[in-house]
Image (cartoon, coloured by chain):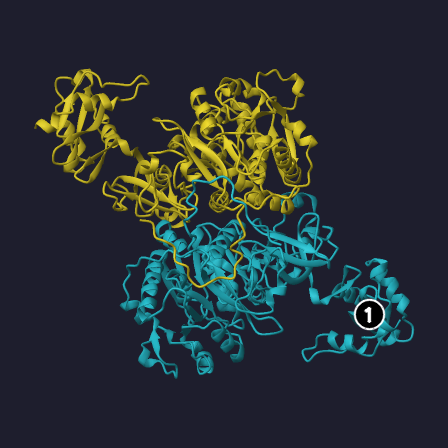
Chain colours: A yellow, B cyan
């Protein structure tokens, strides 16, 4: 049960002042008017704007949207690369009171159409290079009343089936720079992103202005950004509000560089701005930092990025990636964790000063592989099968639950999704992990990959890795099977290396596991097989394993 | 008129999650459990606590207060130096739902008694060294139900007339460490400070939890603090919530050093921790930094404080102070501006990166004397007599108006104080200043020292300084006199240097002023006198001048 807040003694503060995200840009344009925003074109040339100019364009956008009929509360989609118009949309759309619906250009047409319809989107801003994607879904999106084409060309040069279409630049040109932004209740939606899990339809997270404002402050404080920094917006702006970095960057008044449309295969164009623009902060998945590192590796003179911090999320950065960035450029990869549902910052991994003294260099590198400690402002806990916090020993696995002002409390209009929240308001991340005594969290599995045994959890991924570390083993899959007493018990399917086929035994495997696992965690059944059932994309098909062996522990 | 907020599309965020300041410590104790809090004793020895230990003491405090009868909404006063118990009070009192009333130990007994009564204070925590102050007001404070003595001694060793008295340490010892903090509506008062203007009774500013939480995040972002920093709490914790630094420090998880009871005359003990504790951030008035600099000047080996930032507020730091800190230690004095009514951070002066390139070193030092640019999150404007924003030219004077989530919207129970707020919700600071094209603000006068002429303002202080720069002038006072057409017009009282007594003329003075002031600003009347009327503390007594010459412009 959520506690009902108690009203104490009345304060005199301006608590009715609403946190509106447009204020970030409005105030930053005043305090950092000449700071630079750089948007890189496909041919490598650059558009350069000052904050003052970008804010003027943002005001024009607000008026232009009202001019074509957009109203407070409307959902306006954006299908765009990371460029200056996308940034203007980040402020102009929510500024005039509409909802910035960020559209993932990698979605299948079916899912993209679903998202547009689910949000009942009224207008869509689409980059000219992405018109084919928009055209592919337009016929199935009856709510859309118009398409705003993001292009430097005249509309007459644009060949599209979409209708009606507007030119973004023309609309801005004709709109006034004078605007009085509406004062929005801070609980109004600022923008929305849809999560795309592996199962089911995308689910909508609608971030309030309050949520986004508080998250921007949190990023600024935790990434230690200031107006002396230069931020490089690598992470796609359609992913979890661009990880909240656009708003945080403008909040602190730093230089802001947008890579535009980029091709991960074109390593040079992605890495080049690091030096030419003087990047000091960036954020993205290892999949982005990896190809840039490849490019840097081949440079004769390595760029000096000493002091730069690259936030890395989405998946665990490899030790090699972190080491090599540091060794070759001086830049630090900072591991962080979050999700669409968390705006996203939940944990960040900085080595605390006392650990810098106590741990060896090797131990510090190893620590950097953890997702980090929770940022202040959030309630984060790792709970066992019964909802009790696990021991902070860096070993006991549990599910990660998160609560706080920049965490979603529901999914928009998604019946049945309530089970992803606890009664006391935590979002159940579905991620399983551990917490250590220093507060560093480590994600180990998805919860569905954990085996529930007698109220405790056993990590199937850990056990698989450990079995596969045995010299006689080629491949191993571990999953849980229903058990009358313990709820579930593990089974291990093991493919031995040909030369050990006739010698390795189940006891060998259990003995090997005993070095790392408690006795009660060891699998009763270790079954030697010729091959592990796999899905079409090559992952272990645990569903089939569970079906094949479903009665194993029930009969016994 | 304040705009009524409009509710847009509903969001899915956890907007009902209340910003409670105790969460800062609760969460920081988890993420930074082993970080250090150092409290310096009078004899120079130090108490050392981890965050985890301090949070445990804070929980005990919460329970102890409830145990003696404190309830949600009660006002609990603290009369203490900057020590660990003061910090515990900063979190424990508001944590259990009461209001942390910070008592200025420099107040006169009359004012202190007024504040305690005005707040209807229920309990007062008082350091044993400050018992005489408490005893001096106790008889006139009928609302106080008990006194909690802050001491390491046994109560039996404490000789006091106060009754009933409790021992803080004994209460903590007997209280449980287990607590479930109430969830407070974030609009509940966290704490209160009373302003002590030169006129009238102290006025109460009651900060909400929301206010304090947002301000802490703003400090963290703007002072660029992190858990690698060591903050030194120089500014008294009874001044404007200790400038919000305690909450910001714990938020980022930095090392936190409390000087305890200190004597500005004892330079060594105040400056010594800079090196011995590794201070990287501090905050205080120039009056604090000045004696520390004197001490450093006399050291044979100057401390290396490279990279340290000392926020300086309350009055303008001299150029010499800023230069010498930098030259002798590498520490940077960062000029900032605020007031009790603003929690306090309003502006901060960092040299923006492009100005570092464009301005000469001299010009940069000169720029550092300005109060700085407004931090993002606040609406700050400089307005003329009619409420219109003045030109951002670094010259046009106006009154500084401030609005935002950490600005007070009223004074607690202070009839007649409404006039310090505009209809659209700005607090009128009473400070006059200018804004330049880069957004840097400069405080020049108090508004009451400005002359209102035809809807424009003339700075009397500027004009006085300019007249006194004339070689023939010993002293000059400028003030406004009522005028039938222009509302007010300036008069200058000039004391000539003896050798120029018979030669200097009113036109000489006006001509001299014309180099810096517009023609319409020049005083019609330049009156040569033998002496300017002064107050008992030696300031120009403008009230007397205005009285003496009140009909001058009305008759003409």
Q: Chain of mark 1?
A: B
The foreground one among B15 and A36 is B15
Binning the other alpha carbons within 10 Å of mark 1 as few (below 14), some (14 to 19) or many (20 upward) gives many
Residue B532 vertical position relative to residue A109 in the rendered view, above or below: below
The foreground one among A266 and B16 is B16
Give the x, y percent position of residue B2. 60, 53
Give the x, y percent position of residue B235. 52, 64
Specify whether B471 is left or right of A532: right
The foreground one among A498 and A282 is A282
Give the x, y percent position of residue B285. 57, 64
Mark 1, residue position: B491
- Quick check: can you spot residue A126? yes
**Residue furthest to the right:** B503
**Residue furthest to the left:** A556
Residue A212 vertical position relative to residue B198 in the rendered view, above or below: above
Residue A194 sits in quarter:
top left
- Quick check: can you spot residue A227? no
* Residue shown at the point (35%, 80%) measured from the top left: B158
Residue A430 sits in quarter:
top left
Number of marks in the image?
1
**Label 1: which secondary element:** strand
Give the x, y percent position of residue A138. 51, 20
Is the C terminus of chain A in the top left, top right, bottom left or bottom right quadrant?
Answer: top left
Specify whether A176 is left or right of A370: right
The foreground one among A156 and A330 is A156
């Amino acid at each position: 049960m959520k506690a009902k807040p108690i009203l104490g003694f009345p304060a005199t503060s301006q608590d009715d002042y609403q946190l509106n995200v447009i204020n970030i840009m409005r105030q930053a344009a005043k305090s950092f008017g000449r700071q630079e925003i750089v948007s890189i074109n496909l041919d490598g040339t650059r558009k350069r704007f000052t904050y003052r100019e970008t804010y003027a364009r943002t005001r024009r956008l607000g008026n232009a949207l009202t001019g074509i009929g957009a109203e407070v509360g409307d959902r306006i989609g954006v299908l765009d690369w990371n460029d200056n118009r996308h940034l203007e949309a980040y402020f102009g759309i929510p500024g005039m009171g509409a909802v910035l619906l960020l559209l993932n250009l990698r979605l299948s047409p079916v899912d993209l159409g679903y998202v547009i319809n689910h949000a009942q989107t009224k207008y869509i801003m689409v980059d000219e290079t992405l018109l084919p994607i928009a055209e592919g879904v337009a016929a199935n999106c009856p709510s859309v009343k118009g398409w705003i084409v993001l292009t430097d060309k005249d509309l007459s040069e644009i060949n599209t089936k979409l209708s009606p279409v507007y030119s973004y630049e023309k609309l801005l040109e004709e709109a006034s720079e004078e605007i009085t932004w509406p004062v929005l209740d801070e609980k109004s939606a600022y923008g929305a992103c849809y999560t795309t899990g592996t199962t089911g339809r995308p689910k909508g997270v609608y971030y309030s202005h309050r949520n986004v404002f508080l998250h921007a402050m949190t990023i600024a404080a935790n990434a230690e950004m200031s107006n002396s920094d230069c931020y490089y917006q690598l992470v796609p702006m359609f992913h979890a509000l661009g990880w909240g970095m656009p708003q945080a960057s403008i909040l602190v008044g730093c230089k802001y560089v947008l890579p535009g449309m980029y091709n991960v295969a074109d390593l040079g164009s992605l890495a080049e701005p690091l030096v030419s623009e003087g990047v000091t902060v960036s954020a993205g998945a290892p999949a982005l930092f990896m190809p840039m590192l490849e490019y840097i590796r081949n440079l004769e003179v390595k760029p000096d990025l000493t002091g730069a911090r690259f936030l890395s999320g989405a998946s665990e950065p490899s030790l090699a990636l972190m080491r090599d960035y540091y060794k070759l450029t001086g830049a630090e990869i900072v591991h962080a964790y979050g999700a669409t549902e968390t705006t996203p910052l939940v944990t960040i991994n900085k080595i605390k000063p006392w650990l810098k003294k106590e741990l060896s260099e090797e131990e510090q590198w190893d620590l950097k592989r953890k997702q980090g400690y929770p940022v202040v402002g959030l309630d984060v806990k790792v709970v066992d099968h019964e909802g009790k916090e696990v021991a902070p020993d860096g070993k006991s696995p549990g599910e990660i639950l998160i609560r706080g002002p920049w965490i979603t409390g529901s999914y928009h209009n998604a019946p049945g999704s309530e089970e992803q929240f606890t009664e006391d308001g935590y979002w159940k991340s579905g991620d399983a992990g551990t917490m250590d005594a220093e507060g560093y969290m480590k994600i180990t599995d998805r919860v569905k990959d954990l085996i529930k045994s007698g109220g405790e959890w056993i990590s199937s991924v850990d056990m698989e890795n450990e079995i596969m570390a045995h010299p006689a083993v080629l491949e191993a899959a571990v999953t849980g099977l229903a058990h009358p007493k313990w709820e579930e018990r593990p089974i291990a399917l093991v493919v031995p290396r040909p030369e050990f086929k006739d010698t390795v035994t189940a006891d060998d495997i259990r003995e090997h596991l005993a070095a790392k696992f408690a006795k009660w965690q060891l699998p009763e059944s270790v079954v030697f097989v010729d091959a592990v059932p796999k899905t079409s994309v090559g992952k272990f098909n645990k569903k089939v394993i569970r079906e094949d062996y479903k009665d194993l522990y029930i009969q016994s």
